[in-house]
Image: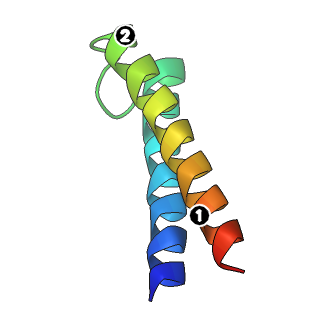
Amino acid sequence: MPKALCIAGIVIAALLFLVFGLDLATGFPFGKVDWLMDSGFLVSSLILAYLGWTTWKDQI
């Protein structure tokens, strides 16, 4: 089960990176309201992906 949670965290991080990266680049889906929020979520998604990846590698 913990491996599934690590993979779920990585997938969620990838989706967040995709959504907020698209918003920062094109303004879709949130209309580019605040670039600081977009960049904060991009950094947070990268941190989440890193934590999920390292935890998954420790379990192998």
Q: Which residue is mark 1?
A: 55
Question: Horizontally, is 46 left or right of 29 in the view?
Answer: right
Res. 38 visible in picture: yes
Question: Horizontally, is 5 left or right of 18 in the view?
Answer: left
32 relative to 45, above or below: above
- Dot 2 alpha-carbon crowd within 10 angstroms: few under 14, some 14 to 19, many 20 or more: few
Quadrant including the C terminus:
bottom right
Among the 4 quarters of the image, the one containing residue 30: top left
N-term-proximal mark, 2 vs 1: 2
Q: Are marks 2 and 1 in contact (CB under 8 Å)?
A: no
Q: Residue at x 59, y 64 (%)?
A: 55
Residue type marked 2: Leu
Among the 4 quarters of the image, the one containing residue 20: top left
40 relative to 18, above or below: above
Q: Which residue is mark 2?
A: 36
Among the 4 quarters of the image, the one containing residue 58: bottom right
4 relative to 33, above or below: below
- Dot 1 alpha-carbon crowd within 10 angstroms: few under 14, some 14 to 19, many 20 or more: some
Q: Residue at x 52, y 63 (%)?
A: 11
Residue 35: image location, x then y, percent? 39, 10
Single out the residue that lies furthest toward the front.
58
Q: Secondary structure at mark 2?
A: helix
Residue 14: image location, x then y, percent? 54, 52
Res. 27 visible in picture: no
